[in-house]
Amino acid sequence: MSLRKLSEKVAKLDAFPKVEEDNKHRSGQGGLLTVILACFLGLLTMSELIDYRRLNTTHEFLVDSSVSTRVQVNLDMTIAMPCPDINVDIYDVGGERLHLTQNFKSIPAQFEAIKSRRYGTLDPKYVHEIVKAAKGQQFDETVARDMGACRILGSFGSNKVAANLHITAQGHGYQTGMHTSHEVLNFTHRIDEFSFGELYPSLINPLDDSIEISESHFEIFQYFLSVVPTTYIDNSNNLLDTYQYAVTDSKKLFTEQESVKYIPGIFFRYDFEPISVRITEKRQSFSHFLVRLSGIIGGAVVTVGFAYRVVRFAITGGKEDANMYRGVHNLMRNV
């Protein structure tokens, strides 16, 4: 069988028959509709492309089966009290008590309601002490007291059990020795970050960028956190074990006479839930994108073409089509 005959046989299977140019009828309305349809399909294509590039996440709730016994706690906050007067301690249900003041960087600061990295308006000696503190070096306590606030920054390892992180003043409640004057007590604070484990994209920590203003020298701020172990799997199947949490808060004012039974300060009480969350990040496949795009374009062209014929038939009453068929019939008779 020759190649030509094979081509003729295959041509009989053509599902896309061609219409001769002489038999095509073009109109201004059809051209305008084609331009509008092309613009519309362009917008749909852009929408599908954006959707294809978007990462979709799914959430699954599971029983926590992890065997890890330690968790990393990250803290970055500013308190409206001088650094030398602040203590940081943790107590857990296992009986472990840790004095964490030395585990964090205590950086002298001037308290602001919003986070700021600008040091241009500060006295040069303040900037010098801030730099020393940021490097972990000993800073001048006199300068720190003049600045009036302290930024506490760092991370520490905690047992994976219920615990209470205390931020209190020297000589109040848990520490002996130097006693901080009542006039200095001010637990107004701004939390820039409070998190557990490592960060992952789109993770929202409820306490980040929050602020509380103290109304008295004697005030307690309490945060109750429910921590949920979380497994994050990205689009490349990289796995990250971390944590997220929900929080409720309260505060209590008391008098100087009641300070014998209450301790002014900031308290983070957290516990770990027995469930875990698995977050999976996926992007639709390229083949799925092509199938959707082909379906949208093909469906739109066919639907608009059919609607155009129906509207045209309704307006003309079928006269144009009848005239066209009559002309073709006459042409065939003449032939």
Image: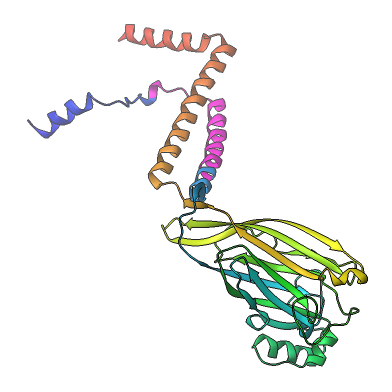
Residue 117 location (% of width, % of height): 73, 77
Residue 28 location (% of width, % of height): 56, 27
Q: Looking at the image, which residue sits at the far left? A: 1
Q: Is residue 117 above or below residue 71?
A: below
Instruction: Tell me if residue 67 is in the magenta stretch.
Output: no
Q: Main secondary structure of the magenta part?
A: helix
Q: Residue at x 53, y 27 (%)?
A: 30
Front position in the image: 129 or 181: 181
Q: Is residue 242 above or below residue 298?
A: below
- The answer to whether one can see residue 106 in this image is yes
Q: What residue range appears in magenta?
A: 22-46
Number of labels in the image equals 0
Residue 5 location (% of width, % of height): 13, 28
Q: Residue at x 44, y 46 (%)?
A: 284
Quarter holding the C terminus is: top left
- In this image, 32 relative to 326: left or right? right
